[in-house]
Image (cartoon, rainbow, N blue to C red):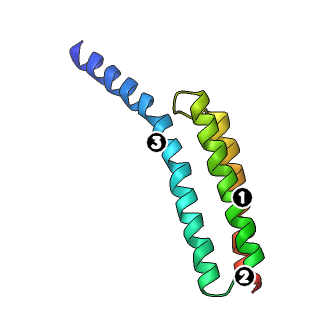
């Protein structure tokens, strides 16, 4: 019986850590996308206007994430993570299109 309790406790602890890990994924994506934007600027594949717009979108997503975390004791709900990921996906496509068009 003790191994089952230990396994159940480990599962609960693992699940409780998942939302925080997923919230960190948002931060990592923002950092990587910022690097891609800077790389596009450095290699003249993004125009200054495109770079400013992509930076602006990333800044907005980061502020939205901070606001959402403030409302939920530092955590993002599944719905909020999904919304932020959609916005990051859209911005990522725009970065790729901008770099490939130049």
Question: Does label 2 or label 3 sit earlier along the sequence?
Answer: 3
* Residue matched to label 1: 57
Q: Relative to 42, does residue 38 appear above or below in the rendering?
A: above
What residue is rendered at 39% in x and 24% in y? 12
Q: Residue at x 56, y 57 (%)?
A: 29
* Quarter assignment of residue 43: bottom right
Residue 72 rendering spot, x and y as whole percentages: 57, 27
x%, y% of residue 53? 75, 66
> CA separation, marks 2 and 3?
32 Å
Image coordinates for residue 102, horizontal then vertical, percent: 75, 87
Q: Nearer the viewer, mark 3 or mark 1?
A: 1
Instruction: Name the disc covering residue 14, or none.
Output: none
Q: Which residue is mark 2?
A: 100
Q: Is residue 30 left or right of residue 12?
A: right
Q: Helix or strand or loop: what does disc 2 sit on?
A: helix
Indicate left or right for 15 with 86 as reference: left
Q: How many marks?
A: 3
């Amino acid at each position: 019986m003790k191994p089952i309790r230990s396994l159940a406790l480990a599962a609960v602890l693992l699940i409780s850590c998942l939302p925080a890990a997923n919230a960190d994924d948002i931060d990592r994506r923002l950092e990587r996308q910022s690097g891609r934007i800077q790389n596009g600027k450095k290699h003249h594949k993004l125009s200054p206007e495109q770079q400013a717009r992509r930076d602006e979108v990333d800044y907005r997503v980061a502020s939205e994430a901070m606001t959402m975390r403030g409302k939920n004791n530092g955590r993002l709900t599944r719905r909020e993570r999904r919304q932020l990921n959609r916005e990051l996906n859209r911005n990522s496509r725009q970065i790729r299109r901008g770099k490939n068009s130049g």
